[in-house]
Image (cartoon, grey):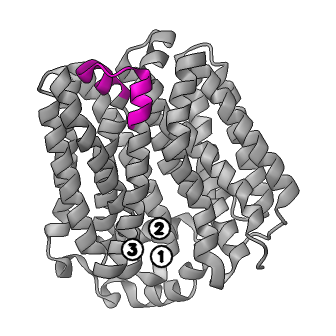
Amino acid sequence: MSGSLTSLVWLTLGAFAIGTEGFMIAGLLPALARDLQVGLAPAGQLVTAFSLAYAVGAPIMAVLTARLERRRLLVIAMGGFALANLLAASAPGYFELLAARLLLALSAASFMPAASGYAAALGGPERRGRALSKVTNGLTLAIIAGVPLGVLLGESFGWRATFLVVAGLAALSLVGILAGLPRQSAGTTASLSERLAIVKRPDLLAVLMTSALTVAGTFTIYTYLGVLLTDVSDIGPRGVALVLLGFGLASAVGTRVGGAAADRWGGRPTVIVCGGLALLAYLVLSFGLSVGPRSAKAVLLPAIMVSGLASWGLMTAQQARLIEQAPAFAPVSLSLNSSAIYLGSATGAATGALVIADTSVGLLGWVAAGFSIFALLPLLLDERKLRFEVEAFGGEHSRQGSRTVFRQG
């Protein structure tokens, strides 16, 4: 069913709300920890809990909601997201906020894949890329504008105000979906066992490991960026917001550059180059954390921008690698890549919390560099040893996947 792509603006708004809520908490952690009277490490676990719930919940929710009419699913998911933001804004303590973050993650994990699937079906084969970009643009805009604006809002009116504003955006998206999107019947979907079977392929597992470890390095730094900049370089909340804006812009550029480079030179070479740049950025950042506040700014800020450009460029190229290696299983492998990304963000946030609790923020750069090194290791192995032949993976299963899994997603 093809239709006008204009109505997809409501899905863009929903993705913007989800991206803003998911990323802005990094800049709010110091104020949030003070208000809830918890340490920075427990506050960082709010990011870990969200990411882990999203990673585990995405494939499960996709299977559980497979038979729901698509617009109804989008309404339920966005309604749950709006409600969870209200619960977060009114949370009396840490554990209530943690519970709200878990509900936020499950709602987001239900909405984002459904929104992409809805957009792809509405656009049809000839406009699928443009339709999907309508949804992903919401996340890009959230990183560029939503996150720094959320930090500024939290600085002026308190962190609870940010959740209230995101709840308002979610409610507006919900109304738009109800009024502006046509109904869309549920398609078939791959079962949970079929999704997990893809991970048995060593070549695809290696790609997913690179995704998870790369994002782990990114979120080791990003989750505690507000703390790091305040403690090490004496940058205030407004300065943190500007740095987050710069990181978002660099990430947006990296996404475009990584995609273009993957088209021109292939996914694997692009991932190697971007991974190397990210590693270099973390090493430079580690050096910047060891010098005085004045010198730190001159070192930290360029390193943070380069890390954003490189890590997001790498993730775009990773999607190209998955499609290159197994075109017939692309929809399922891409959904598993999303889970790997959130698993990586949970790992990075949790590791950063341990580093801060046991040592100091000065070691975060070295930990991120370690994740980057391990992310590059699968790329340095002989890919011929990682790839299964079709017969090794199961000829009949692979042939069935070519006919069914690619269609299902």
Q: Amino acid at mark 2?
A: Leu
When asked about the image quadrant of residue 65, the answer is bottom right
Residues 272 and 329: in front is: 272
Q: Is 403 rendered above or below residue 191?
A: below
- Which of the 4 quarters of the picture holds residue 367? top left
In this rendering, position of residue 260 left or right of residue 172: left
Say whether marks 1 and 2 touch (CB < 8 Å): yes
Residue 300 appears in the rendering: yes
Residue drawn at x 47%, y 78% is 329
Image: magenta residue range: 226-243
Q: Are marks 2 and 3 in contact (CB under 8 Å)?
A: no
Residue lying at 37% horizontally and 79% vertically, measured from the top left: 263
Between marks 2 and 3 in the image, the one whose residue lies nearer the viewer: 3
- Report x, y in % for residue 294: 19, 23
At x 45%, y 62%, the residue is 336
Secondary structure of the residue carrying numbered label 3: helix
Q: What amino acid is labelled 1 in the image?
A: Ala
The residue singled out by tag 1 in the image is 330
